[in-house]
Amino acid sequence: MSDEEESEERIKIMALGNSKVGKTSFIIKYTDNTFQDVYLATIGIDFKIKNIVIKEIQYKLFFYDTTGQEKYRSMAVNMIKNAHGIILMYDITDKSSFDAIPEWIRSIHDLKGKNFPVILLGNKIDLEDVRVISQEEGKKLADEYKIEFFETSNIDGTNINEAGLAIVNKILDNRRRVSISDSNSSISSHSVKVSVKTKSKKVGKSKKCC
């Protein structure tokens, strides 16, 4: 391994959601700035890599593309365990993909906790004329789970870069938060107990009166 590879920070990001919501196209658009206009079902797990620099630090992003097919659902759930962050996606023209979001979020919370970095994307806003999920509905669901929300288009690139950067920043913020928490725990566990000795006051014999 080269010195450059050793100095890179590696970040694993998973794209989750039902089949055909545009996970593969989103990753290709973000990593290669191209649009894949032919639907090819992802079989199991696939990934692409993108290198970015934030505040003079180079990061290698691994985007894991997971199938939304039910028979591969357990594989996707198991992959969550190794992820640093999740891009959760639905199709604004497909109500069933939107209705499945709470189930995906429950799986994430069960495996990674409620503070795990997640963003929600309502994809395919280029199909506005056949939209069935409003922007307000998407925002309301995201607010319910306290996660950031974007509406995106893999065709014209609307909010693609913004969403990609948002999940990376959430992962980095989470790392800093965990690092500070671990540091405070370490300080607490190594603290020295100081016992304070109190001097007991001797009480003399009382003089006989009279």
Image (cartoon, rainbow, N blue to C red):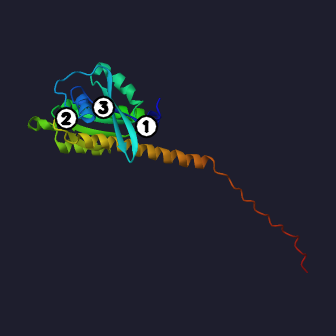
Q: CA distance from mark 1 to mark 3?
A: 22 Å
Q: Nearer the viewer, residue 19 or 51?
A: 51
**Residue at numbered disc 3:** 15
When asked about the image quadrant of residue 164, the answer is: top left
Q: Earlier in the sequence, mark 1 or mark 3?
A: 1
Q: Nearer the viewer, residue 142 or 208?
A: 142
Percent coordinates x, y for residue 124 in the rendering: 17, 35
Is disc 1 surrounded by few (<14), some (14 to 19) or many (20+) residues within 10 Å? Answer: some
Marks 1 & 3, CB-CB < 8 Å contact: no
Determine which residue is flagged by label 1: 8
Q: Nearer the viewer, mark 2 or mark 3?
A: 2
Which residue: 41% across, 32% down? 111
Q: Which mark is residue 59?
A: none
Label located before the other in sequence (1 or 2): 1
Report the amino acid beneath label 3.
Ala
Query: Which image quadrant for residue 48?
Result: top left
**What amino acid type should be assigned to the residue bearing mark 2?**
Asn
Where in the figure is residue 58, as x and y percent of width and height?
Answer: 39, 40
* Residue 97 visible in the displayed image: yes
Picture disc at residue 154: 2
Q: Determine the residue positioned at 63% across, 47% down.
A: 190
Taking the image as shown, residue 185 lies to the left or right of residue 95, namely: right
User: Mark 1 or mark 3: which is in front?
Assistant: 1
For the C terminus, the quadrant is bottom right
Badge 3 density bin: few <14, some 14–19, many ≥20, Cα 10 Å: many
Taking the view exactly as shown, the residue that stands out farthest to the left is 129
Secondary structure type for disc 3: strand
Disc 1 residue type (three-letter): Glu
